[in-house]
Image (spheres, rainbow, N blue to C red):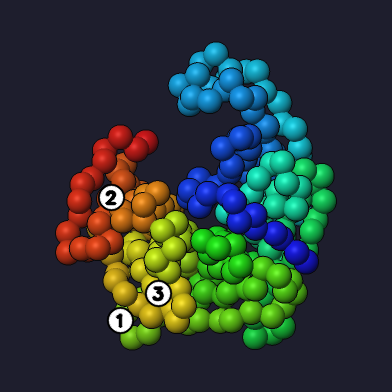
Amino acid sequence: MTVERREEEEDPSQQSTDATAVWPFLSCDDNTIRLFHLPEEASYIDQLASDYQDSYHSNLVINEAEMVYDYCWYPYMCSSDPTSSVFVATTRDHPIHLWDATSGQLRCTYRAYNDMDEITAALSVSFNSSGTKLFAGYNKMLRVFDVHRPGRDFQQFSLHKGKDGPSGIVSSIAVSPSHSGMLALGSYNQSTALYAEDNMELLYVLHGQSGGITQVLFSKDGNYLYTGGRKDSYILCWDVRNTVDIVYKSLSRK
């Protein structure tokens, strides 16, 4: 399986898609994934929420077998290059699927197995910043797939060691877009752990949410990390260069 990165492209932001065509994405409880291709004039979120709210229909509907847990776009996705127009999705009781965003065809699968040699589903997924690795979160565990080698080959890292690291399900994954090699893992044990991507060395553990972490996101420059909890009405902002204290707390999240 080949996914090509075009060298002339700019580094991707955490929000996934290219600048020439926006592909918003919805994973639904009816086991389907819907993609929407927005026209160029719909370039502002406020405009989308008002004038264009009822103007769009999904261009592509992909049927998964079970409920969709998570998805992630290939970081160098370019709509004009069909080779790069792909995303991964993970669903209950199934392997990770790499889907073609143009045709809706299944490109390949990445499969992890438990001790009983049964397929175990990832709860969260993310590409690394160069698009060569696929991170998959499980219970107290991270598996890393080579994007160009689909199948059941992967590296496995146990995350909970003693009192350090996530002691629950890895519910959200974020990779620094600055190519610093920093990886953030949010978990249901109310903490976010930061690792060095190359050797999975634990760097920091961030606390402050009252519920399980449901979202982690780096700023575009990679200097700040935003975390949100399942039971919280706020988002925390951390400076990853100095994690002694929270930078600020946003109360606008609903």
Closer to viewer: mark 2 or mark 3: 3
Give the CA distance from mark 2 to mark 1.
Answer: 23 Å
The residue type indicated by label 2 comes to: Leu
Q: Which residue is mark 1?
A: 163
Q: Which residue is mark 2?
A: 236
Q: Residue at point 63% right, 34% down?
A: 21
Q: Amino acid at mark 3?
A: Ala
Residue 231 or residue 130, whichever sits in front: 130
Q: Quickly name the residue at label 3.
A: 196
Marks 3 and 1, how far apart in space? 19 Å
- Of helix, strand and loop, which one carries label 1? loop
Is 42 drawn above or below residue 150 in the view shown?
above
The correct choice, above or below, for 74 with respect to 234 in the image is below
Q: How far is disc 2 from disc 3 in space, using C-alphas?
A: 21 Å
Indicate the secondary structure of the residue bearing disc 2: strand
Residue 63 position, x and y percent, is: 77, 47
Quarter location, residue 19? top right
In this view, the mark in front (2 or 1): 2
Q: Residue at x 38, y 80 (%)?
A: 201
Picture mark count: 3
Q: Is residue 87 above or below residue 27?
A: below
Q: Crowdedness of circle 1 by 10 Å Cα count: few (<14), some, many (20+)?
A: few
Where residue 200 appears, as percent x and y from the top left, is: 43, 79
Report the mark closest to the observer, 3 or 1: 3
